[in-house]
Amino acid sequence: MKLVVLTGAGISAESDLKTFRDSDGLWEGYNIYDVATPEAWERNPELVQEFYNERRRQVLKAQPNQAHTILAELENDFDVEIITQNIDDLHERAGSTKVTHLHGIITKSQSDRNSNLTYPIQGSELQMGELCELGSQLRPHVVWFGESVPMIEVAAKICKQADFFVLIGTSLAVYPAAGLIDFVPTLVPKYIIDPKIPNVGRYRNIITIEQTAVNGVVYLKEILSNDR
């Protein structure tokens, strides 16, 4: 049975990571348009590079939480596919083996000329002057506002194959990721875990778990164990 899980900032927040902007429109005190757009990179690449170096340091310091580890353990009983909006590597470090990153992953770099050229980052620092094989500057392997989401079609195909679908810690406000639930077959059970359940009134077979990611995933594991 295929268990498809879409995760957002809420699951990483319990590992003390802010993976997206705060309610005031800022991300770690920065306007997102100053650090998370192609225009920001063109305008001030040094600022953008250092901003993501600091985010990377935070990610490497953080540890997977119980929600991450339970999702990895569920691979013992299900074909688990994780689709994440987060740019951290906590799912992988918890042991999940099938993870699709919609918005890239901060532990890799990419060419600023060809986004298909990606490289692992050694340590936490990516420096100005580090070049790809084409001779252009390396930038974080992160999808910025205004850029296409190359993995969205892959994720949509995964959602179409779901026997169970789980949404964890996302408000369904960021597109195109928020539209992935539309690709899940109508009759498939759809579990939503969040302290504040997003508006999903038009969907069928919704089971809401109004809890934090950790508490909600603990409860989900009990439900799925009973359903098998």
Image (cartoon, rainbow, N blue to C red):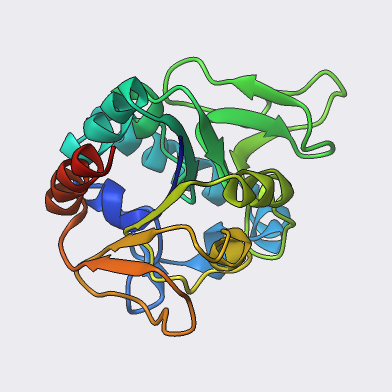
Q: Nearer the viewer, residue 14 or 18?
A: 14
Q: Residue at x 55, y 40 (%)?
A: 101
Q: Position of residue 216 (x, y in %)?
A: 17, 53
Q: Nearer the viewer, residue 38 or 84?
A: 84
Q: Position of residue 182 (x, y in %)?
A: 60, 67
Q: Is residue 178 left or right of residue 16?
A: right
Q: Residue at x 37, y 32 (%)?
A: 91
Instruction: State the image quarter where residue 21 is shown.
Output: bottom left
Q: Residue at x 39, y 71 (%)?
A: 171
Instruction: State the image quarter where residue 144 is shown.
Output: bottom right
- Residue at the extreme top: 122
Q: Nearer the viewer, residue 74 or 128?
A: 74
- Image height check: is 171 above or below 149? below
- Image height check: is 129 above or below 210? above
Q: Nearer the viewer, residue 173 or 104?
A: 173
How many marks do you count on the picture? 0
- Image height check: is 130 above or below 198? above
Q: Quadrant for the C terminus, please.
A: top left
Q: Position of residue 219 (x, y in %)?
A: 14, 49
Q: Position of residue 193 (x, y in %)?
A: 27, 60
Q: Visible in this render: residue 62?
A: no
Q: Visible in this render: residue 26?
A: yes
Q: Is residue 128 left or right of residue 222?
A: right
Q: Is residue 49 left or right of residue 64?
A: right
